[in-house]
Image: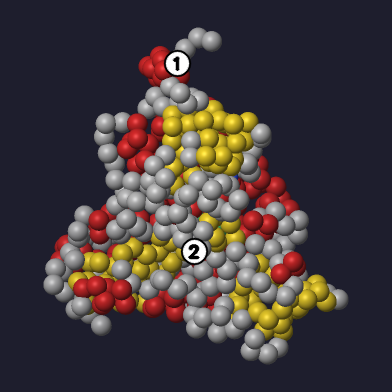
Amino acid sequence: MPLTKLQYPVYIPTLWKKLMSEFDYDLFVIGAGSGGVRAARMSAGMGARVAIAENRHMGGTCVNVGCIPKKLLVYASHFRSEFEDAAGFGWTVEPENFDWTKLIANKNVEIQRLNGIYERLLTNAGATIYNGLAQLADPQTVIVNGENITAERILVAVGGWPYVPNVPGKEHVITSNEVFFLEQRPERVVLVGGGYIAVEFAGIFNGLGSTVTQVYRGPVFLRGFDDDARHFVAEEMRKKGVDLRFDTDVLAIQKCATGLTVKLSKGGSIDCDAVVYATGRRPLTANIGLEACGVELNPNGAIVVDQRYQTNVESIYAIGDVTDRINLTPVALAEGMSLAWDLFSPNEKTVDYEYVPAAVFSQPNLGTVGYTEAQAREKFGAVTIYRSSFTALKHTLSGSDEKTLMKLVVDDASDRVVGVHMVGPDAGETIQGIAIALKAGATKAIFDRTIGIHPTAAEEFVTMREAI
Ligand SMILES: Cc1cc2nc3c(=O)[nH]c(=O)nc-3n(C[C@H](O)[C@H](O)[C@H](O)COP(=O)(O)OP(=O)(O)OC[C@H]3O[C@@H](n4cnc5c(N)ncnc54)[C@H](O)[C@@H]3O)c2cc1C
């Protein structure tokens, strides 16, 4: 086969290494998700002999049953409020007619396209793909489809899996794994859980026209996010028609004449067509030979790694959700890249875990970077808070009562802005830029010196002067 320019410099050392090495590969990656694909692709690109195994879909959770299809559904669900808002601007919008089957079919086509791209990225970089479940036979041997494959190093990047507690009627519920493939849009949905996935799906189904109830056992959802932002999201969701039941647990799920009945700890029950559990995810580490190899796991099954993603077994590494630290795609990507650089290049690229921004694609969005007010008070002591909530310009004509929240947390000693939180349209887009400022160490004085872009919601971040 003629060599392309790209392959040539890689191919000669690769062939030489194969002849010299006692192993089939330099690196065997288990799991072709965000982290695994990035590590495999980068390592192969640096001249390592790499293989990767995947037993479900190329691209992993994010591409197939996570970030990407979810955001597409979020877009779809937004149209309802866009249609409603349009009237105030002079448009007459015909009564909308939403086709779930078409949305899911179009989404599936896009996901298949992405699966193909991921596969080509790997093969073009020179990695070998094994389709099948990989298990560890020993610290340097993997078994896939009955074949023993040896590697100098093994990277476990198997991600996580939805966790559903043992509730009577558990067999009737679905999770984020199934919700993307429902044949029909359920008219009445109960979302169970208080994390970002439950919140996002409550917004999706509400926007698409379903009657939505979200049940969460704690006092308010989105634990870990800033308290003001959590309460604000809850208020906005209630205004949009989502029935939020906090401090409430599910006792049982039963079949009934019209679908399913969810029995609640506070008394009463809800009849619905689908119950979606989003009650957390657990690392997918059972039955793949990790314990037999002596790899240390946390009580929840997460693989314990050091700063360089190495486990207590020298040849075995782990990155991404399977280590259960910051479970986000960009973090898994950064870890995959960092590991590849570490193992197969003279340079190092460490991942900086401070000021990792995140968004909840709730309606409206929540965007966040840095410390919550409570965390900042604990870490820095004296902090000053700037907070503003207002009606965005668009809604002066749309008639919508949606509000936007912006909040800055400033460390008094250094004047550094250490936390920024926003609830409002496109908060995720806005916060990405702010995250750069925080990483650069921006102070409140620098925020104040920055000229705003008018008229935007984001300008509020540089015009807040009154501390609360
Ligand atoms: C509904 C949902 C929405 C999300 N939204 C966002 C978002 O908006 N933004 C964001 O940043 N993150 C989001 N996430 C999280 C994000 O998807 C994960 O953080 C990311 O996918 C982690 O990447 P990973 O490589 O660690 O694991 P994964 O992407 O889960 O990849 C692991 C892969 O390993 C494969 N595998 C497992 N075991 C084996 C085995 N034994 N042999 C072979 N293959 C195996 C799996 O099939 C999978 O493909 C979301 C997650 C969910 C569930």
State the residue in front, 250 or 134: 134
Q: Secondary structure at mark 2?
A: loop
Check disc 1 and report its element: helix, strand or loop. Answer: helix
- Looking at the image, which residue sits at the far top? 2
Q: Disc 2 designates what residue?
A: 299
Q: Is residue 267 visible?
A: yes
Give the image location of residue 242, x and y in percent.
60, 76
Instruction: Say whether residue 334 is left or right of residue 217.
Output: left
Residue drawn at x 44%, y 42% is: 316
Question: Residue drawn 19% across and 66% down?
Answer: 416
Is 115 situated above or below 428?
above
* Distance from the alpha carbon under mark 2 to that under mark 1: 42 Å
Report the side of 51 relative to 352 (left or right): right
- In the rendered image, residue 330, in percent from the top left (x then y), is placed at 42, 49
Residue 304 at what x, y percent from top left? Answer: 42, 54
Q: Is residue 40 above or below residue 194?
A: above
Q: Marks 1 and 2: in contact by CB < 8 Å?
A: no
Q: Residue at x 50, y 83 (%)?
A: 219
Farthest-out residue, bottom: 267
* Label 1 crowd (10 A; few <14 / some 14-19 / many >=20): few
Residue depicted at 73% across the width and 53% down the height = 101
Q: Earlier in the sequence, mark 2 or mark 1?
A: 1
The residue type indicated by label 1 comes to Leu
Q: Nearer the viewer, residue 79 or 387?
A: 387
Judge from the rendering whether residue 344 lies leftward or rightward of residue 179; answer left or right: left
Q: Quadrant of residue 119?
A: top right
Q: Nearer the viewer, residue 379 or 456?
A: 379
Q: Position of residue 452 (x, y in %)?
A: 25, 61
Mark drawn on residue 19: 1
Q: Amino acid at mark 2?
A: Pro
Which label number is shown at residue 92?
none
